[in-house]
Amino acid sequence: MTQDTHKPALIGKTVGHKTYVHVETLDERPDAGDLAERVAAAEALAGLRRGTDFNLVRVDAESGELALLHYPGFFDEAFPALAASWRVDLVGGSLSHRTYAESLNPPILHRKELMLSADDPRRETFAALTMACESIGLFDDPRRIGYRRQWQQLVRERGYRIEGHRLVPLGNADDEAEPDADANDGDSGQAGWLAARHRTAMARGGFSAPIQTLARNGLLDGSHSLFDYGCGRGDDLRGLRENGIDARGWDPYYAPDETIVDADIVNLGFVINVIEDFDERIEALLRAWSLARTLLVVSVMLANQNDPRGERFRDGVMTQRGTFQKYFTQAEIKGFLEEVLDEEAIPIAPGVLYVFRDKDAEQRLLMNRYRSHRNRLRAPSARVRQEPQRARRNRAAERYNAHREALERLWALRLDLGRDPDKTECADQLALTEAFGSVSRASRFVESRKLAESGAEVVATALETASTARYQDLLVYFALDQFGRRKPYKHLELGLKRDIKVFFGDYSTARAEGLALLMQVADTDAIEQACRAAMEHGLGWLSGQDPAAPASGDKPDSARVRATSLTLDSRLVERLPALLRTYIGAASAAYGDYQNADLLKIHIGSGKLTLMRFDDFDGQPLPRMLERVKIKLREQDVEYYSYGAQYPPPYLYWKSRFINEENPGYPDQVAFDEALDGLGLFDLSGYGPPVDELDETLRRHRWEIDGFTLRRGDWAPELDDPCGRFLTYRDLIECGETQAVTGLPNLPERVESYDALLALAEQVIDPVIDWFGMIRLTYGFCSPALARKIPGRIDPKRDQHSAHERNRRGAPVCERLGAAVDFIIDDEDMLEVAQWIVANTPFDRLYFYGNDRPLHVSYGPEQSRQVVRMVAGASGRLVPRVISTEAFLSR
């Protein structure tokens, strides 16, 4: 969890060094005056209006850059999508724009409540959704939550869907259930399972929500047996068994012959909400409870704004498919369980509650609930056998459903052609003519259906977009056709003749417009504008020169830089503006198919095109270049460069800039690129560091690349290896008096301790030495063996000198982890040194003993920034006194 949703004192959402603020709360922040002035300047530079063109501001604390962001659905959508962004550098006077209007996978926003005032009535609803997401681990992997496609997949994997601002379990709701094979199936013979209850059993591709909560809470580690009372089609059972779990189940319809047995854990998943008789509902609950030795898990469908989904029946609804559903609120199901079982019910996730028979197990759960060492389940394999199913009839659109596939193909053809298709172009001509009289009538019919489903504006936009795209495609075709021999009109394909008539009127006009487009390839201003338009739509990365260089377009020179090139994934070429496709096509006429390359670079001013091919472009975060081909359009010349023994293949840095968010690997690539840059070890501008330099620098700083993740290395360094820029590991390990006297090796046994010492050196010690000069270490790393030899009062359980070492019981010696040192700087006032550390470094804890005494400083995962003054007590012994950083800096 990266944000505390319970501390509304400072309005805004902070992720790393970037803070997001809603425009409605700009004047409620402590920095309101300065921020308002900067936002006003950014508005003027971008020519935007707050609230209309953008509603969020992102402030980068490191670079000072502002981003004006537009989330049209901020208040209405649970996780609104970004529609457009404007990045503004007020210092450099530069501006860049990106639209996501056509993106299939735009960035989305989480934790909206952090950007609202504490008294905003909507804050509670948004915060409740955030807490629900946290409870099922949706925010555990930040790389999977930033974009809509990955986020929706993750939510479904966790066994939920989003309705309004609520998480709803993917249980057995009528709209989530698969249609059953026989709508007239009756009772299976088991009392209490009437109203076609078996037809609510859902077929899942992953584990259900209650099973996933058990895994997240460490209860599916193989030490507990599980019985699924009402197991439905058995997807959970199959997956659990594949994960080595002793799991059995019974269902009155799908598994009536299975033996009902007791187990450590009993799952009553989405059962009591399909029982229409109240007494039978209680009977099912009590029966399941009687089988549970340790824990009963109960899950139900939650009430939401779309209920009821059928006719009222008793205390629930009877759906059109003959299934009963009782929708509970979280409080209602908790009260029902506690009243029937006379035991406390613990809400674990939306619609999922635990009732413990074993109270010791209950306490262990409550203590360990938020620990990260929970086992993960492999998703169950696909069901081998599946029951025959029949599609549900839609009485309101029988005619449409009867010919759905043919009509959808016809609509897709119309969008592809950008015009009304001729009957000869329709593969379903015969079937549609028989059903509707003609292909044109079928086309009008399907358009009317689309209008009813999506609205006139959406349909009109789709048709206009399709028509424009087809016209651009034809322009490119006729532009590049200039390189070949002109075909007589009568020899053209019939579909092309229709295109010419609809989009150009006649053949000569089509060729003239194509020639005009080809001639525009030499217009550098037009090429630059097209490249800017491409980047605004996420198609590649635009490189530029000094902002003072002359620039064209409707923005002042101070807001733009002269672009020099556009580099992009070759798979994005077909989405480029027509002029750039023509530019690339003209180059391909001299060289060959550009699709053999991974990346393309359009050189705006020089009339060149570079094609680059890499080793495993998609599979590596830093793919290595194998060959580079530079095509010179003006000179009609080609230069070829191959990399190998003589010229080592270089890494490609910032690969995420050249692909876009619709690439499945984009979130992982972005996370890797930002992590590599965030190390602060390299200058990744230009071509970046050579391969050997990057590899050696990563090794020296104990980093390694594991897939698309940067992680600390699992090897122990040599004692004389550098630890930071000024010290070695030996300096930090062999620096205490007791170690020198006893001669104990004092070596860390865990590689994490070396990592902690390195982090302490890089984050705290190096900056101090940079500013004040060399330090004199008096106490550094302390192994448990050394701690037993040190006379006097030390506190290994709290002082962090033991880093990540373990005691004899296998627990950390110091729960705070991290690492610590004591040091003094000769001829310096240690109060001044301590104050500088507090003001300029991300320390964990600092103990100040006096102006001429060594000070203790640590760096660790808590990042508490706690300052402690050691003062003499009544007995003369030093007593710790915690002091605020503000008070300490003002001394």
Image (spheres, grey):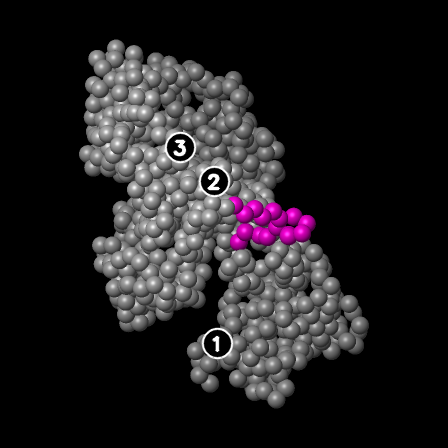
Amino acid, disc 1:
Ala
Please name whichever residue, 732 or 338, is drawn nearer the observer in this view of the structure.
Answer: 732
Which residue, given by chain and number where applicable, does mark 3 sit on? Answer: 484
Principal SS element in the magenta part? Answer: loop
Residue position marked by numbered label 2 in the rendering? 590
Segment colored magenta: 638-653
Q: Label 1 crowding class (10 Å Cα cut-off): few <14, some 14-19, many 20+?
A: few
What amino acid is labelled 2 in the image? Ala
Residue matched to label 1 = 839
Residue 152 in sight from this viewpoint = no
Q: Nearer the viewer, residue 156 or 436?
A: 436
Give the mark nearer the N terminus: 3 vs 2: 3
Of 664 and 81, the residue lying toward us: 664
Q: How many neighbours does mark 3 have within 10 angstroms: few (below 14), some (14-19), or many (20 or more)?
A: few
User: How far from the left and from the top, in percent, is residue 233?
Assistant: 47, 24
Residue at image position (47%, 27%) is 231
**Three-letter residue code for mark 3:** Gly
**Vertical position of residue 754 compared to residue 791: above or below:** above
**Relative to 6, is 255 on the left or the right?**
right
Question: Residue at horizontal 32%, vertical 25%?
Answer: 488
Residue 400 at what x, y percent from top left? 26, 19
